Every structure is written in structure tokens, then in C-alpha cells.
Image (tube, rainbow, N blue to C red):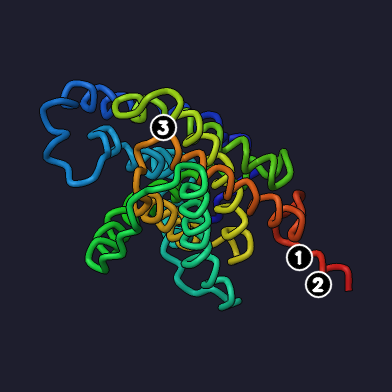
Amino acid sequence: MVINNKSSNHSPWIFFLLVFILAIPFWLFGLLTQQLLQKEIPINLPISALMFVCPMIAALILVYRNNGANGIKQLLSKAFKIKIKRKIWFAPIFFMEPFIMFLAYGSMRLMVGSIPELDFSLLKILALFFVFLIAGICEEIGWQGYAYDTLENRWNAVGASIMLGVVWQIWHIIPHLQLHPPAWILWQCAGSVLLRVLIVWVYKNTGKNVLAAAIFHTMNNVCSFLLPNYDSNIAPISMFIVTAFVVLIVTFLWGSKTLAQYRFIHNR
């Protein structure tokens, strides 16, 4: 049984509503345990960040309602499809976010001056990667695997990406408020809306590979937490500036309509 993204039963707005409803217990738990448990977590994340399971749960509920067990199998198969036809896309999947991080770090040094050196402990990188990969897969099963294609049926790729990115970041605001000031949240969310454009770019150019999108998402989280002074306002500002520059280049080269038609090949 094939999941029909154009079906009236497949509504991204119902999905978004369900994701927000499912997140409420996590938000409340994070608020209640903010002072009690925060010191026990080795990285600066609120307990409510465990809401990463909500997009996957919401997608599975809606797919099962419309398509039964076969729909769930199809959705999960999209999330664990390892094969990528054009191997060159492994490069942006794994290395674009480190490239953005290095440029952001350089801009931080220009704006602030003396900041701590980057810490590239292999153990730290691997630990962050595997933790964030679990979260990335759970999120992208919902955001890309379930919601995105229907949005692109109504807008172009960049428009659908921004729409999805805005909803994605509104969903993050309450957990952010449990740790960060408004200025940090503003720049972090703005940069993450642009990040969604890059996630969609990878997703579209790897044959709608949800796992590729999840790994790219994971690499962004890993690189963000490797930045020194990540909790200061300067880090998300720097990431926003560099990400905006990269998004402009990607949109120019691959086109806002699909993010998948490289202009110098398409026009031959």
C-alpha cells in the first residue's frame, strides 16, 4: 500500500497539531525538572528535548490510521534507506556542516576576538553523533518522511522548506526558553529555519532519503555543540550568517522551485 501525499487524509496541519500536542508533557516535565535534573545532563539541553520522539510518533499514528501496518513499514523503510545513488552527496551530508562551523568559528573570532579553541576530541564527536543521530532519525521520519512532500505539492521547494522550518522552530521555542535568553533563541531559530532549506536540499538530491536528511540534521547538532561559547549570543548569530550565505548559493545553483536541478547541468 502506497502512502498518497496528495490525499485529503494526509494533512501536514493535522500532523503539526499532533506533534505539538504530544510535546506538551515533555514541555511540562522539562519545566518541573529544570533545576532538579539539569546538572545531571552532560550537555546543555533541557529535559524537554526528549520531545524529539514526537514527530515520529505523530507520523506513525497518522500513517497507521490511513494506511495500516503497510503504511508504517513504508514510512520506516524511507527512514532507514542507506543506499544513495550519487555517492558524491555523501560529501555535503557529512562535511557541509563542519565547513559551516569552521566559517562560523572564524566569524566569531573576528567579531569577539579571543575565544576558546575548538575541541575535537574523537570520543566527544562520536558520542554527540550517536546521541543526536537517534534524535535526528526520529524527527526526520516526521518532518521529511511524512510532512514535507505534501507541503511541496502546494509551494515550491524553498517555500515548503521555510514553512516547515518555521513550524519546526516554533515547536522548539518552549525548550529553548528553559535554558536561553530571547536574543539567543531568535538567532538560533532563524538559523534553523535556513538549515531546513539545506536539509531539504540533501533530501531531494539523494532520492528523498530520510536517513540522509537525519544525518545532515545530526551533523548540524554535533557541530553546534562543538562551537565554543555555544550558549552565548555570538554563536547562533555566526551560524545564521554563514548558513544564510550557503543557502543563497544552494538556491542559486539548484533553483528555488525544486532545489534539485543544478543549473549548469540542467541548461546543457
Rendered position, 158 above or below 122: above
Contact between marks 3 and 2 (CB within 8 A): the answer is: no
Residue for point 27% across, 32% down: 48
Q: Between 100 and 107, which is closer to the camera in this rendering?
A: 107
- Figure label count: 3
**Quadrant of res 43:** top left
Around disc 3, counting alpha carbons within 10 Å, would you say few (fewer than 14), some (14 to 19), or many (20 or more)? many
Residue 15 visible = no
**Left or right relative to 100: residue 255:** right
Residue 127 or residue 208, whichever sits in front: 127
- Circle 2 packing at 10 Å, graded few (<14), some (14-19), many (20+), is few
Residue 247 x %, y %: 65, 51
Residue at 44 percent of width and 29 percent of height = 185
Q: Which amino acid, mark 1? A: Tyr
Residue linked to disc 3 = 172
Residue 236 x/y as whole percent = 46, 40
Residue lying at 44% horizontally and 53% vertically, measured from the top left: 220
- Identify the amino acid type marked 3: His
- Mark 2–mark 1 contact, CB under 8 Å? yes
Mark 3: secondary structure: helix
Q: Name the residue under label 2.
A: 265
Could you tell me residue 186's position as x and y percent?
A: 49, 28
**Label 2 amino acid?**
Ile
Residue furthest right as drawn = 268
Residue assigned mark 1: 262
